[in-house]
Image: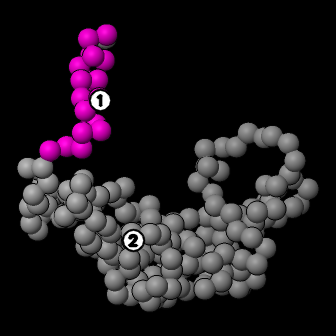
Amino acid sequence: MLITPLQLENEPLHIAESFAPGSIDFTTGIVQVGSLPVDGQADLLLEHREGNQQIADIRIRAHYAGDFEMDCARCVEPVSMPLKGNFDLIFRPQEADADSGERAITVDETEIGYYEKSGLLLEDVVREQVLLSLPGRALCQPDCKGLCSRCGQNLNQASCSCEDTPADPRWNALAGLADKLELKH
């Protein structure tokens, strides 16, 4: 859904979208499960600058809720992540602050996003908000055993015989290296 300042000139735009799984590419390892409804409103904010210049900022206030799956950080099994959140964001046209040279910005300006001449894609806003809401890593269970580093077996599902096999002899040269490094410190 493209949101443009022209759409917002006379009245706010009510947002009632539902994104199907796969319609937004979140990133590798994150999968949307089921629909992702987004409800809210987009408004036009006119910012007055020097010389009677007006900047058409877009403010989006919305709520989203959906179910996602992330890969477990240890065993790579899917972990269910129900998400919901609210956001209140302001976007300014890219060319508004594209003047040459350096300038100081206010703390409030650090919270402003930018949109291109064609407008602002709601999908991009929702994608960013979902990614910011997800944890940096997820575990399928607090005591996840992960994968065997030798054979790749998921140790939560079964054990493997790798523990009984001796290590590759090519690593023997490094066996005492850690102890030697500790002695020097």
Magenta-span inclusion, residue 171: yes
Which range is magenta?
166-184
Real-space Cα separation, disc 1 to disc 2, in angstroms: 38 Å
Q: Which residue is mark 1?
A: 174
Q: Nearer the viewer, residue 30 or 103?
A: 30
Residue drawn 39% across the image and 63% down it: 133
User: Left or right: where does residue 56 sit relative to residue 62?
Assistant: right
Q: Position of residue 158 (x, y in %)?
A: 9, 66
Which image quadrant for residue 151?
Answer: bottom left
Q: Position of residue 144 (x, y in %)?
A: 15, 58
Residue drawn 31% across the image and 73% down it: 69
Q: Position of residue 14 (x, y in %)?
A: 55, 86
Residue drawn 33% across the image and 75% down it: 68
Q: Amino acid at mark 2?
A: Ile
At mark 1, the secondary structure is helix
Marked residue nearer the N-terminal end (1 or 2): 2
Q: Position of residue 104 (x, y in %)?
A: 73, 39
Residue 57 visible in the snapshot: no
User: Left or right: where does residue 72 sit relative to residue 104?
Assistant: left
Magenta-drawn stretch, dominant element (helix, strand or loop)? helix
Q: Nearer the viewer, residue 160 or 72?
A: 160
Residue drawn 51% across the image and 77% down it: 25
Q: Amino acid at mark 1?
A: Leu
Question: Pointer 2: residues within 10 angstroms few (<14), some, or many (20+)?
Answer: some
Question: Pointer 1: residues within 10 angstroms few (<14), some, or many (20+)?
Answer: few
At mark 2, the secondary structure is strand
Which image quadrant for residue 142?
Answer: bottom left
Q: Nearer the viewer, residue 37 or 161?
A: 161
Q: Which residue is mark 2?
A: 30
